[in-house]
Amino acid sequence: MPNGSLERFAFGRSSGGGNSLSWERLFDITVGIARGLDYLHRGCNTRIVHFDIKPHNILLDRDFCPKISDFGLAKRCMTKESIISIDCARGTIGYIAPEVFSPQFGQISSKSDVYSYGMMILEMVGARKNINRSSETSSKYFPQWIYEHLEEHYIDAWETSIHSEVVRKLLIVGLWCIQLQPNNRPSMTKVVEMLESKADDLQIPPKSILC
């Protein structure tokens, strides 16, 4: 792909490098990924759960339209089947939904992709990886760090009202997507609806017990 993967651009603002994306372009990319996942989950003859959604697996074409790639860990199931059985955890640390590790958090389903998607967009808005051993803030649980910035308006773009709508919307949607219990996460269809609505119409989700 002409523009490589999203990983090349996702954290550019934090490093001060030249690979950062405008908030408008970032928003368009996140909407495009959401629509792509929605198609995989309910638009195909068989439901496809990717299990490895992360910036590295999102390729960008010449116009920065996102393409979901690397289906090596994906699992197919009938669209009428909502629960998925796997023999071992799969995915990339930092993006794997809790239920993929332990059944105490719920059953594995397409909502596992929703979690990965949410963590990915929160990373991009926060301009930092959710696991970063070189960062002084890496010891703090990433969603807690995001909640604090959401409440205190510390995300850098919030200082400019022209971008505050986009940033706040992405943060709220991302936090809904990473709810611990799969049943509390929106479907990707709902995610698209939320992204296309106004930020003021979206409620901030309750903090999880880990925040």
Image (cartoon, helix red, strand yellow):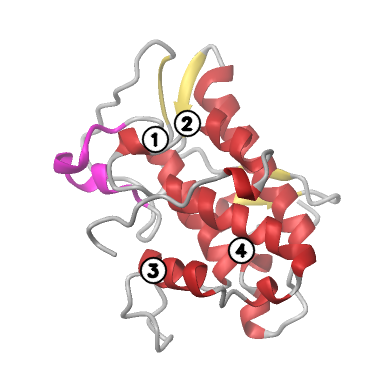
- The residue tagged 3 is 142
Q: Are marks 2 and 1 in contact (CB under 8 Å)?
A: yes
Name the amino acid type tagged 2: Ser
Q: CA distance from mark 3 to mark 1?
A: 20 Å
Name the amino acid type tagged 4: Glu
Picture quadrant of residue 88: top left
- Quick check: 208 above or below 84? below
Q: Earlier in the sequence, mark 3 or mark 2?
A: 3
Query: Nearer the viewer's eye, disc 4 or disc 2?
Result: 2
Which circle marks residue 111 in the picture? 1
Q: Residues within 10 Å of mark 2 (few under 14, many from 20)?
A: many
- The residue tagged 2 is 187
Instruction: Give the secondary structure at mark 4.
Output: helix
The structure residue drawn at horizontal position 37% and vertical position 61%, both measured from the top left corner, is 94
Question: Residue 154 location, x and y as percent?
Answer: 56, 78
Q: Earlier in the sequence, mark 4 or mark 1?
A: 4
Question: Residue 67 location, x and y as percent?
Answer: 68, 42
Bounds of the magenta span? 96-108
Left or right: where 192 falls relative to 24: left
Name the amino acid type tagged 1: Lys
Which residue is nearer to you in this view: 137 or 86? 137
Q: Earlier in the sequence, mark 2 or mark 1?
A: 1
- The residue tagged 4 is 7
Q: CA distance from mark 3 to mark 2?
A: 22 Å
- Quick check: 47 above or below 113? above
Residue 103 can be seen in this image: yes
